[in-house]
Amino acid sequence: MAKGPSFTCTACGAVHRKWAGKCDACGAWNSIVEEAPLTAGPKALGARGKGIVLTDLATQEDPPPRAPSGMDELDRVLGGGLVPASAILVGGDPGIGKSTLLLQAAASFARTGLKCLYISGEEAAAQVRMRAQRLGLRDAPVALGAETNLRDILTTLDAERPALAIIDSIQTMWLDNVESAPGSVSQVRAAAHELVNFAKKRGVAIIIVGHVTKEGNIAGPRVVEHMVDTVLYFEGERGHQFRILRAVKNRFGPADEIGVFEMTGDGLQQVANPSALFLSDRDKPAPGSAVFAGIEGTRPVLTEIQALVAPSPLGTPRRTVVGLDSGRLSTILAVLEARCAIPFAGLDVFLNVAGGMRVNEPAADLAVAAALLSAREDVAIPPEMVLFGEISLSGALRPVSQTENRLKEAAKLGFTQAIAPSRSKLGSAEGMRVRQMPDLTAFVGEIFGAG
Ligand code: TYD
Ligand code: MG
């Protein structure tokens, strides 16, 4: 049996004999917490529990009922609306607009007749009210509370029984039976656990707001993500007005769905046609720019990939990436060098997705390669052309999913040419001249002459 307490890293699960500020196993800071030892006694080992009820897989379950908010961008990300008794985490950098989004969402839900409670632990009721009035939400029947004591909040929720409660934010909440300070790992974990349990037991949907630390984790470790049904991230670049609500986990709908918003002086406005927005400030054809026909969740989204290639004064040239995975850039540069004999040694490379968008799809490889080549050769890609395709390490182009949707969206926005991998299922791509290429070498020969 365990003697005394043990210490577990909440980031990687490693067990330590004593507490330390840094976990040796994964390098995380401040992630080690004390775990209570197993209890000895009649219930410990060998004691029999009662049998559980087993069912089969054939029993038909109704799809969960959903309450749409009326904000289409939010409803799509939720998978069609709010599922009763579900727990949702909305994470994002401080100041990105989470409170604004959720206050607008609360008002929108309340106006559909749903009973809504908004509890702010960060701002006084007067502050929230002022913001609501500025956003034109004065008449929305949202019940407002300013409190950080979770026991009081749960008691209130139990008495009020709203359909939806919004807790802003989990880092300000504290339980009186946990000794550490609000915002610490144990408080956040315990508070989230109480809220999720409450949601399930009392049938109240709960949206929990969480600030993300610099490393991209919510409250240090990702403990809260495992507990909730749905995890949404609200992201955007500072200095850009676009904000993207992205589902990274959803037990009741597709993950990777996005909703696009624009932060204005009157709060967040929904953006129904993100492609037009992301391409709106494209200038005249310039070297280093390529338009990628991508898919975000269930929706096609066109984005502009920009590259700048310049001789480097440094021994190790710079590789700067915004909005894309830097590992992916290294791979594409290596493939261009090894398979097409186009070296980037001695050249600084800057790569950027315009508009503050983040692209995670491997299908963006071809557009990235095109932007890089275009910048290096100083040859502009035709402005009416979109590209998509995954590049394999051999330099071959691999077909990607939903080719037809990508082409349709491009045609809708006035594009007339596309480069796609061979064997893509084109479907009916009306108005588009699609050229299919087997590999990167063929692409380089076609667009940039012999390379
Ligand atoms: P907020 O919702 O408080 O962010 P979070 O809860 O994620 O910390 O958003 C704050 C920012 O949004 C602040 O910098 C001001 C800006 N903002 C607007 O531009 N327009 C608005 O109508 C509102 C309410 C906020
Ligand atoms: Mg806030």
Image (tube, helix red, strand yellow):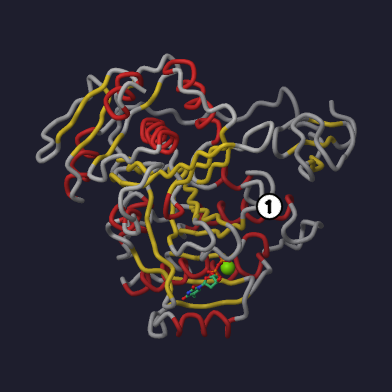
Residue found at x 70% / y 26% = 47
Number of numbered discs visible in the structure rendering: 1
Residue 299 position within the rendered picture, expressed as x and y whole percent measured from the top left: 29, 45
Q: Is residue 68 above or below residue 333?
A: below
Seen in the image, is 169 located left or right of residue 11? left
Residue 450 in which image quadrant: top left
Residue 294 in view, yes or no:
no
Q: Is residue 395 above or below residue 194?
A: above
Residue 318 in which image quadrant: top right
Residue 266 position within the rendered picture, expressed as x and y whole percent measured from the top left: 41, 77
Residue 205 position within the rendered picture, expressed as x and y whole percent measured from the top left: 46, 58
Residue found at x 20% / y 28% = 435
Residue 162 position within the rendered picture, expressed as x and y whole percent measured from the top left: 45, 68
Q: Nearer the viewer, residue 317 or 119?
A: 317
Quadrant occupied by the N terminus: top right
Which three-letter amino acid code belongs to the residue tagged 1? Ala
Q: Is residue 84 above or below residue 221?
A: below
Q: Which residue is denoted by mark 1 in the rendering?
A: 190
